[in-house]
Amino acid sequence: MLRLFCPLIALGLIFCLHHPFSGAQNPREDTWESILRDPLLTPQDHTVIEHLRPWLPAEDYLALDKAQRRQLLHYGANHFLEEMPVSRCWAPDTPMHVLLAFHVVEDAARTHKNSRKANQFFERWNRTATNGREGREQGRPITLTWSIVPDGTPVPGNPAIGDSDEPSSLRSWLGTLYGGDAGSPENQPWFPLIANLFDTIASQTGITYRYEPNDDGQAISGSNRGQTGTRGDLRLSGHPIDGDGATLAYNFFPDHGDMIIDTSDSFFENLSNNSRRLVNTIAHEHGHGLGLEHVCPIDQTKLLEPLISARFRGMQFDEIYTLQRWYGDPLEKHSDRRNNDSIQNACPIELAAGNPAEFQWLSIDDDADVDYYTFPLTAESQLTARVIPSNLIYPEGAEDEQGCRASANFDSSTLHDLSLALLDRNGQPLATMDSSPAGSAEALERFTVPEQGQYFLRIAGDDSDAAQLYRLELEVREPAVDLTLAEFGISNESNGPANGMVEPGETIELQVALTNSGSLTAQNVRAAISAPDHPDNFTGFDITRDYGNLASGTTDSQPFTFALSGFCGDILALELSITTNDNFARSFPIAIELGELSLRLVEEFDASPEESLPPEWSSNYSGSGSGWSFSTTQSGPGNSASFAETFSSLGTSSLVSPSLTLGPQGGNLRFRHFVATEASFRNSDVGFDGGVLEVSLDGGAWEDIESAGGTFIEGAYNRTLSAAYQNPLPRRRAWSGSLGWINTVVNLPSEFGSRTMRFRWKLGHDTSDSDEGWYLDAIQVTGLTCATTKPIIRLDLNDGFASEFNLTDTAHLTFSPILPLARDLIIPLLTDGNGTPGVDTRAFSPLILPAGDTVLRLEVRPVRDNEVEGPETIRVSLEPDQVFPAGTSSAAITIIDTPYGQWAAQRIGRETPNRQGQDADGDGASNLEEYFWGSDPTSSFSVPLPNPRISGGFLQVDFPLQSLPPSSTIQAQTSTDLSNWTEDNVEPIASGFRVPWDGPARYLRLVYTEAFPR
C-alpha cells in the first residue's frame, strides 16, 4: 500500500534537494553501536537499523524524539521487510530533520530492492470480481468494480502509518463538505466527482470501471476481495489518520485496491477548481491501486510524483502511458472483447462522411501488439488516415539513493516506428504507409476507395518491448469535387527593384494554384479575389480567372492582378472565392502583409529544464515571488515554456528579455501565454493575481506597454487588478483569471524604431488565495521594413524617324508599366541631343499614364521651322530617380529636314547664309534657284543659265526639267504689268519653256516651289 501526504509543492521541491549519506560519509559507527545496545529494540528493529546505518547518520536518528524514532522503525520495517510498502509525501511544516530521516528510509529501501525501470510500475491486477483469476497478462484490458464503504466499516490502523482504528466515516465526512443525506452514495452531490474521475481514466486506458452500489461493510483488509453484488474491487473508505498535514490518504497495491482517506485533514476543505485537491488525491492513490509507483523528478508534471500537485487535474501523460503499457488502450475493449489484435477482433469505428474522427489515447503496448480497426466505405469515397506518435519528452525516473531526481529524459515519440496499412475485406493490403522515421507521423491522404464494402486499418509497431502512444485521425469524404487552395505567391510586381514583397500602393500579380483533391472532375472552375474587409485598400485589375476543368488530383495556377494600399506592416485579409458548374462553392482567406517583417528576437523556451533561462534572459522577484524558470507542465509549440508561480502571499516575478532594436518603421511583439491566476467570480473585470507587459526604452524606466505607445492587436489585457489584497500591481490593467492558452500581438510604433528596448513580463500576486500561475512561450519580436521602390516603366521606340517635310511622318514612343498602376503616373522624361522638344517638335506635354492603363503612346511630330538644320536627334530616357526604367535605356528620334534643308545643310552648311532667298556665293542667284538648277551655291562661277532666245516664233527659256528636285515644282509665267502673272500660252518643252513671240510686250519669270504634302 502507498500513502499520500500534504501536497504544498513550494516547500516539497526544497525537500527533494536532500542528498542521502553513503557509508563513506558516516564514520560514526560507534554511535550506531551504542544505539543498537538499547534493550527496547526488537530483532526486527535491529534488521531495519542494519539497512539504514550506511545511509542515515546516527546523529540524525538521535535528533528524532522517541515517538518519531519508533515511527521511523515501523516505517522502515514496512519498506524493507513487507511486500507492499507505504510511500509518503510530507507537509510543508514538517521539521526538516524528520523529513530527511523518513526520506532516507525510502531511498535506502529502493536501493535494497533495486530501482524499477522508468515509468514505475509495481504489478498489475491478477484477479478481479468481473474477470476472475486470469494471470497478469501485460496489455490486457480489465474490469474493476468500485464501491464506497458504509460508515462504520472497520478500518484497522496500519503500524507503518500510525493512523487510528476508527471505522470509516467517509460518507458522513463528504456530506459535511458537500451536503447531502444518509441515502445511497450515487444520489449524493459529491458522487459525480468520484464517478467522473473513474470515467476519465477509463476513457484513457483499457480499464473498465463499474460502480458497485453494494458494499457489505466487511473490514478493509487484503483478504476481503471484490465480489459482484457484494463489494467492489476498489473500496473507498476514510477515517482520521493524523489530522492536518502529513498523511492525506493511503492505498493498497494490486490485487488490493482499497483506499483510506484522512477525514481529519482540513486540506480537503478547499473546494476550488471543482475540488481539485480531493480529486487528485483520490486519483493519485488509485494510481497506486493500479500498480503505479512514484516517479521523479518533482516538477509538478506527473500525478504520481511523491508530492501531490494541484496545478492540473487527474492523471497526466506519464500515468496514462504506463497504464496503457499494462492494461491496453480504450479501443481494445469493445463489445465483449478485450483486444483488437486481429482482423477478427477489429474494433468497429463509426465514420460519417464530412465528420473527421480523432482518437487521442491509443497505443501499441509491446513488441507483439497490433491494432485493427474496421469501418464501411462507399465506392469513390476518399479516406484519410493518420497515425501520430506522442511527442512528449520529459525527465523521468524512480526515487533512488540520490533522492527524487530524473534518471534521464524520457522520449515518448520514438519507442516504436509505427506503420499504417489499409486492408480490404479479405485482409489484403491496399496501401501501406511506413516510410517516415520513428517519432514521425504516417499518413494515408485521400485514398480513393475502389468499391463499397468493409475495410480494415492496421496500426503496427516494431520489435520494441515498450509502449508507444499515438493519436489516430480518420476522415472520409464522399465522392465529390473538392477544390483547395494549394499555394499562392507573388509572380510579378509593378515596382522595382522587385523583392518578393508588397509595398504600400504596389500592384502585384499573385499566382494562385488550385488543386482538385476530390474524386470527381470539377467543371468550369472560376475564381475571384476580393478584399471585403478592406475595400478601400484594394484596387482590382484582373481579379477573375477561369481555370477550366480540373480533373481529380490535378492542379492549375492562374495569375490575379491587383494593387494594395495602406501602411507598412498592415496585414490585409483577402478572400478567394471559387465556384464551379457542379454547384461547388468555397472561399479561402489569403493574408498579405505590406512590407517585410524581419525577426529581431525568437524564443521558444525549449532548452533543458535543468537550465535556468535562455542566454541573455533574466528573472528577478520580490517578496514571495518564485521568479521564472523552465516548465513542461504547459507548453506552446514546443515541449516546455517559461513559468512563474502564484502564491497566496505578496510578491512579484519578472522575466526580462535581451536588448534589441526594431528599425525605423516599428514592428510588433507576439507571444503565447497560459494564464491561470486568481480572479473575481462576481466581477469579470476584476483580477486578484495577474501579469502585465512592460517596456524600457534606451535603458530608461519601465512603462506599461500601452502607456509607452504600444497597442494591442490581439489578446489584450482582460481585467483590472484589485488593490484590496495588497497586490503589488494595484489598479493595473492585466491578464488575470483562467484564460488557458491565448495569443497576444502588440503593435510597436515607429517611435520605438531607432531605440534600444527590453520587454518585461511581470506577475504580481496578493495576500489572498492563489491559482497556478503564468506560462509564457513562443515569443517573437519583428521589425517592419518597407523598401523604397518605384514603378517599373518600360520604354520602347516604335518608329524613330520624323520628317519636317511630311508632317504626318511622325516618330512613336510607348511607355508601359509591368502591371497596371493604382494611381495616375506622370512619366518623367529626360532629353538631350541637337534637337529640342517644343522647338523642333511639338512640346512633350506632361505625359500622364492613367491608373489602370497598361500603355501610353507618345507621337513625336516635328515643327516645320524653315530653318536649315539637316537631320536632328532627340534622345529620350526615363528619370531613374522617379521610375525604375526597363526596356530601351534611351530612345533616339531622328528629325529629317525638308529636301531643301537637307541640300542646303550639306552644300552650303549650317553657319553661312543658307535660307532659300539668300545668295550664299553672291552670284546673283538665290540659294533656292541654285537648288533647283543644281548649280554650286558656294561658287560664283556656277550660276543658273536660263539662256533665253528666239526660236521659230517662240521665246524659249532653258531649264533642266529632267533633274528637278523631288517634291518640287517650277512654273514659267508672263505678265504685262509685273503685277498680274499668268501661265496662259506658256508651254513646257523638253528643254524648258516657250511662249509665242508675237503679241503684246510681256515679262517672263520662272517660279520655284517646294511641294509639301498636305
Image (tube, rainbow, N blue to C red):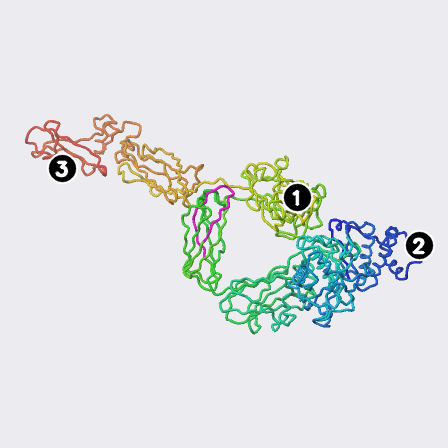
Extent of the magenta region: 556-576
Q: Which SS class for mark 3?
A: strand
Q: Nearer the viewer, residue 210 or 865?
A: 210
| Of the image marks 1 and 2, the number of the one nearer the N terminus | 2
Q: Nearer the viewer, residue 467 or 162?
A: 162
Residue 896 part of the magenta segment: no
Q: Which SS class for mark 2?
A: helix
Q: Nearer the viewer, residue 581 or 914?
A: 581
- Find out whether the residues at labels 2 and 3 contact each other: C-beta distance under 8 Å: no
Which percent across, then down, holds residue 553? 48, 62
Circle 2 residue: 34
Circle 1 residue: 763
Q: Residue furthest left?
A: 999
Identify the residue at horizontal 82%, vertical 60% (top origin): 160
Q: Nearer the viewer, mark 1 or mark 2?
A: 1
Q: Amino acid at mark 3?
A: Pro
